[in-house]
């Protein structure tokens, strides 16, 4: 059983309230505002624990570091800004089924949709 620590609570809070998927370094930067002496290794360790306990999920963006967001159980539509490389989780969701039908014998457990372009700050 994992114990709850202030560092873990602050890191989880940073992820939950960010409103978009964050890199580990972005998570560390936000959490460090509340715990100035928070180590980067501690941040990575807590992200791993949160991911293993399915409280956060990774969002992959090719050619970029992994990002993490709160695992709310919803399939997501993400927007990737090509100028600043930030990812955004969009409120609009796709239908409950993926856009393509899986081959016979495959069991779909979720899907992602990635849109690309310029965010309001960059474009």
Image (tube, helix red, strand yellow):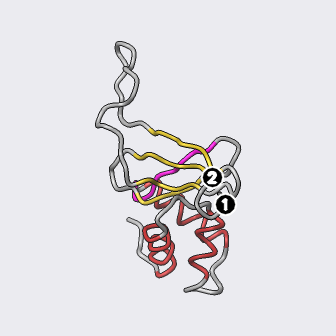
Q: Which disc, if any, is residue 2? A: none
Q: Residue at x 34, y 56 (%)?
A: 72
**What residue is at 28 percent from the left and 37 percent from the top?**
96
Q: Which residue is mark 1?
A: 122
Q: Quadrant of residue 1?
A: bottom left
User: Quick one: label 1, few (<14), some, or many (20+) residues within 10 Å?
Assistant: few
Residue 48, position as x, y percentages in the image: 54, 58
Q: Residue at x 65, y 85 (%)?
A: 37
Q: Does 58 sit left or right of 86 as displayed? A: left
Query: Regarding mark 1 in the picture, which secondary structure is present there?
Result: loop
Examine the structure image and report whether residue 17 is included in the region drawn in magenta.
no
Q: Quadrant of residue 17?
A: bottom left
Q: Pointers 2 and 1 in contact (CB under 8 A)?
A: yes
88 relative to 17, above or below: above
Identify the residue under disc 2: 118
Q: Measuring 46% from the left and 52% from the top, which residue is drawn there? A: 57
Q: Is residue 66 left or right of residue 55?
A: right
In the image, residue 101 sits, relative to residue 7, either above or below, namely above
Rendered position, 7 above or below 61 = below
Nearer to us in this view, 92 or 63: 92
Magenta region: 54-61
């Amino acid at each position: 059983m994992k114990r709850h620590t202030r560092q873990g609570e602050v890191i989880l809070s940073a992820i939950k309230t960010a409103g978009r998927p964050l890199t580990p370094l972005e998570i560390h930067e936000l959490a460090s505002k509340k715990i100035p002496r928070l180590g980067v290794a501690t941040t990575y360790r807590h992200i791993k624990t949160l991911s293993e306990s399915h409280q956060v999920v990774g969002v992959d963006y090719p050619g970029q570091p992994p990002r993490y967001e709160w695992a709310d159980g919803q399939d997501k539509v993400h927007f990737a800004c090509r100028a600043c490389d930030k990812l955004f989780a969009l409120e609009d969701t796709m239908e409950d089924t993926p856009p393509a039908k899986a081959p016979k014998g495959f069991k779909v457990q979720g899907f992602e949709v990635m849109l690309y372009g310029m965010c309001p700050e960059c474009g």
